[in-house]
Image (cartoon, helix red, strand yellow):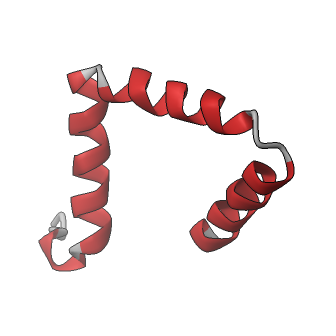
Amino acid sequence: MKWLLLGALLGLLLAFPPLLALVLATVAASLSKPVLVAFGLGLAARGSLPRLRRRVR
């Protein structure tokens, strides 16, 4: 699913070049907020390392 979304984004960027500036501004704005960066890194670590998940008893 994430590959489809990435492909759709890249397709839109190729079809409409001015969208690149909008995407870069959005990425820069989100990276300037440490809480969002920490949340994103936590989601990435949890998704890529399934053995870290604990079973609740």
User: Which residue is rendered at x = 83% and y = 43% of the image?
Assistant: 16
Q: x, y (%) of residue 6?
A: 62, 62
The quadrant in which residue 21 appears is top right
Task: Name the outermost residue toward the bottom.
Answer: 51
User: Which residue is rendered at x = 18% and y = 70% of the image?
Assistant: 55
Q: x, y (%) of residue 36?
A: 31, 29
Pick the front one: 31 or 44: 31
Using the image, determine if residue 32 lies above or below residue 1. Answer: above
Label total for image: 0
Task: Name the outermost residue toward the front.
Answer: 17
Position of the N terminus by quadrant = bottom right
Position of the C terminus by quadrant = bottom left
User: Which residue is rendered at x = 13% and y = 70% of the image?
Assistant: 52
Pick the front one: 48 or 52: 48
Q: x, y (%) of residue 33?
A: 28, 20
- Horizontal side of 14 relative to 47 (left or right) equals right
User: Which residue is rendered at x = 52% and y = 25% of the image?
Assistant: 25
- Horizontal side of 3 relative to 34 (left or right) equals right
The quadrant in which residue 48 appears is bottom left
Using the image, determine if residue 18 lies above or below residue 35. Answer: below
- Horizontal side of 43 relative to 49 (left or right) equals right
Pick the front one: 50 or 54: 50
- Horizontal side of 3 relative to 24 (left or right) equals right
Using the image, determine if residue 39 lies above or below residue 28. Answer: below
Q: x, y (%) of residue 31?
A: 32, 29
